[in-house]
Image: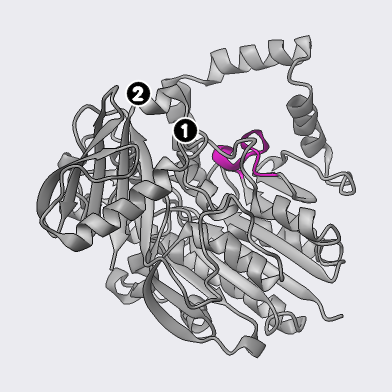
Amino acid sequence: MSKKLVIIITVDSLRFDIINNPLLWNIKLPYIDNFKMDSVFYKNHYSVGPNTPYSFPGIIASEYPLMYKRGLGLSKSSKSLFGHIKDSLPFVKTTAIISSNMWIDKIFNYSKGIDNFFFVENTGLKYIPDDYTNLGLKSKIKSYFRYNKNNRLVKFIKRIYLSMFNNMISRDISKLIACIKREKKSPRFSKLLDLFFKYSEKILSENITVLWFHAMDVHLPYLPKNIDISSRKLFKLWKYVIGRISPKKISKSDFSLLKQLYAKEVEEIDQQFGRLINWLKSNDLYDDALIVFTSDHGDEFLEHGEFNHLDKLTEELLHVPLIIKYPVSLGKYEVVKCITSHIDIAPTIADFLGIKPHKNWKGKSLLGNSHKNFAISEVVSKKKKRTKKSRSDFFVERVSFDGNGIEKYLVKFNNKSYSIKVDRKIEIIEQTDNEKLNLILKTILEEHMKMEKRSRSIEKAKKLFSVHVK
């Protein structure tokens, strides 16, 4: 039996436009560009949410972030891709090598079904798989604190640590040190690859392997290695990004420099991605592998008055790259313009492995020819003020809900606004004058009202829906 290898690479905060046309950002991405030539490039791919907590339920469990929980990981009702694979094919070896991101930690159930869950921090490994216990003293100490969190001594040490180091001044100091050292809290993709190459024989020991990398290189603060800039300037730019200094006050030169720093981080991702591709080719694993390259969400650069990736639905945050290299035997090399979503990734991988999609999954396999051609994104907004209008084709905001089972929506479509009321039987009470809009809205509501397993806090909060249609 020939080996089957699936590799999922998620790059945090990576925008679509910089992958689609890197020259607009004054950079070159030779490895990713060559990879696109070997692959299917989905040019209208959308995340299910604007930041990591809201996006990963779509990638890993083919569900919308507000289905069961408030965008905070996977619930007991969720079925992750890895869990479904292990249920169907117990002999498959599953591995995740994650650059430390608290939102995809074990406590949010992302390790379900994963044999080897490496949560990598600059100080070592937070978790040590059972048969990798020789990875160092620092990792063992961190693991002890993690798994003995109810121990009185551990609680006492944590309380002292938080009182001393978890305040604004200490956080500013830590960020300044990061700017001086050019080192983020989360290790770079290169460190994840070093770990993989070191233990590749163990990780790839079975005939079928599913491997997931999550890289934080592009996530703020932008601290590329090879750029001549003072630490003081880096720290000032960081404060613009997080809103400590009003973004409105940023100069044109600083704005240009900030975008340059982001672009340089993407260049470094490209170089490390090239390392992985070359290693796969040298070990005769590239041609037959299924490789998924995507991002959880994008980043804003003042397109809507802010930086970062806050709780709002905009094109810059939701439109992300998706490139899938299918095995050479399938002969799939093309650019796909129909709309796809994060919820389609897990069914596609399951289809490749010969597994039926789980009954709770909302997406469809991209190996087939039938696509929904619309994508739904969600977020809970605590702001009283509405977010600025998205540049997407279609924007739905849930405005209110009354005791009679009537929901009122404000719908923006082709720059026109409509007020629509819908009852629980999915009947549009107040029709618009746009038949296409009525049909799309009915489909959307059928999707969402079937999954009213939401907490009361969600029902009371303002929910934003963004729907991209073509």
Rendered location of residue 462, percent (x, y):
30, 31
Q: Residue at x 46, y 57 (%)?
A: 224
Region rendered in magenta: 100-111
Residue pointed to by mark 2: 460
Q: Which is more N-terminal, label 2 or label 1?
A: 1
Residue 187 location (% of width, % of height): 60, 49
Identify which residue, 377 or 227, lies in the foreground.
377
Say the numbered circle drawn on residue 70. Answer: 1
The image's colour scheme reads one colour
Q: Which is nearer the eye, 306 or 421? A: 421
**Which residue type does callout 2 highlight?**
Lys
Looking at the image, residue 325 sits to the left or right of residue 302; the answer is right
**Residue placed at 15% from the left, 44% from the top?**
430
Check residue 115 in the rendering and tell me which mark sits there, or answer none: none
Whether the magenta-drawn stretch holds residue 469 is answered as no
**Structural crowding at the residue carrying mark 2, measured as other residues with C-alpha within 10 Å and reported as few (<14), some (14–19) or many (≥20):** few
Residue 23 vs residue 127: left or right? left
- Residue name at image x 80 percent, y 65 percent: 200
The reply to whether residue 257 is in sight is no
Q: Is residue 200 above or below residue 144?
A: below
Residue 458 position within the rendered picture, expressed as x and y whole percent measured from the top left: 40, 28
